[in-house]
Image (cartoon, rainbow, N blue to C red):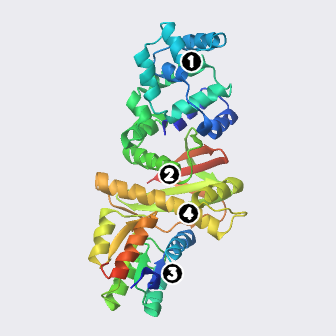
Amino acid sequence: MNIQDLKVLICDDSMFARKKLNMTIAGFGVKEIYEAADGEEAVAKYCEYEPDVVFMDIIMPKITGLDALRQIIDKYPDAKVVMASSVGTQGHLKEALKAGAADFLQKPIADDDAKTILENAAKGVL
Amino acid sequence: MFAQFFGAYLLNKKLVTPEELTQAFEDKNKTRMRLGVLAINAGLMTAEQVEYVNVAQQSVDKRFGDLAVELGYITKDQVEELLAQQPTEYLLLGQTLVNNGALSNSDFEAAINDYKASNQFSDEDLVENTSESISKLVSVFYHLEKAENARVLTNYVSMLFKNIVRFVGSDFTPLTSSAVRDFSANYLVTQKITGGVNGITCIAADSAEYLEFAKRFAGESFTEVDDFVNETVGEFLNIQNGLFAVNESNENGLELTMTPQTRSSDGKIVFEKAAFSIPVAFSFGEIVFIISIE
């Protein structure tokens, strides 16, 4: 699979953060990009679109990114959810990996890091 | 980072005006370091000797270094050593202020020596942007040694200045802080930190400055404050707090998290405990960062 063919879901309560990551990913040629603005919407959009990769913020209203991650993994154990958070503390890292996160990116997300995630997802090694 | 705090020192001592400092930050990148200022900073020549060489240069066609060596002020090796140095930010700022006529060479000499001595800064402190040297600058400038929660506050404020340089720009001067119980501004974005330490953090500014700050951080142009601008400023606060939390987790084993940012609708925030307000003067105006640790 090429990264252009990936379906990507961006979950972040910050419109600014979503727009920035969306532009970065679109710049790599990804065409199908969806967005969610809180944890609940993240779960709903995942079920609706079943994306290949999810970028998930942690601190969000309604339910946190970690709870959204748990709900997604519960229904879709193979989901590829990458936590993309400003709070990459040891505690959050452990909790995210335990809950089934595929990887963890510290915000602000470097373009190269986002690209590596997508390339790995396209190769099936995320 | 030392340049900004040295600028604040010059401002507090009324050696330069805010306008002169702003202008110097704008001009700094075009400034070429001169040997005279380097020699003064290294303590190898006095301002008087530098002036003498400058005047002498008007009548003979010789380079500053050659003339200073001939006059016996400095050795050839010392000249080479000075020329090999990478110009540091604070020296470029000093040179720009001298070039712009805001400071004389002797004002600069007195100020830099007094600043280094009164704060016990070593030459390494001034040149290296290490976490320790930034913490020291911050702690000395804000008198944080005696503050309650000194370590946490120093770490938070040091991280803040690193992030300002990284994401907004280096053309700023930290202004004198104060303890506040409430704060009013056109725009206020807040975020709570919870866990091993509980606190409230805030960015406050009036419209024009708020907009300009958002523009810088987003790298986009905005014409009016809307939801997107609010979320942009909120994201700066979120990233600052997040990086602070990561640092506390890695360095001190303190686990922290944050709540989603909120915007104060009436332009006012009240703190239960005295908050530490940190105004920062950018070339576009003033932004106030506030932290209250509960």
- Nearer the N terminus, badge 2 or badge 4? 2
Task: In the rendered structure, find residue B100 and report the number of the disc placed on it.
Answer: none
Q: Are marks 1 and 4 in contact (CB under 8 Å)?
A: no
SS category of the residue bearing label 2: helix
Distance between mark 1 and mark 4 Cα atoms: 52 Å
Pointer 4: what residue?
B234
- Mark 1 and mark 2: span between their CA atoms? 38 Å
Contact flag, marks 1 and 2 (Cβ < 8 Å):
no
Discs 2/4, front: 2
**Pointer 4 and pointer 3: residues touching (CB < 8 Å)?**
no
Residue B63, disc: 1
**Tags 4 and 3 on a common chain:** no
Chain ID of residue with mark 4: B
Residue A64 visible in this rendered orientation of the protein: no
Secondary structure beneath dot 3 equals: strand
Q: Earlier in the sequence, mark 1 or mark 4?
A: 1
Question: On the picture, is A109 further left or further right than B110?
Answer: left
Q: Amino acid at mark 4?
A: Gly
- What residue is rendered at 38% in x and 76% in y? A119
Helix, strand or loop status at disc 4: helix
Which residue is pictured at 47% across the width and 26% down the height? B83
**CA neighbours of label 2 inside 10 A, class few (<14), some (14 to 19), many (20+):** few
Q: Eyeballing the image, is B28 above or below B189?
A: above
Residue B98 figure quarter: top right
Q: Residue furthest top?
A: B71
> At x 33% / y 60%, what residue is drawn?
B255
**Mark linked to residue A36:** 3
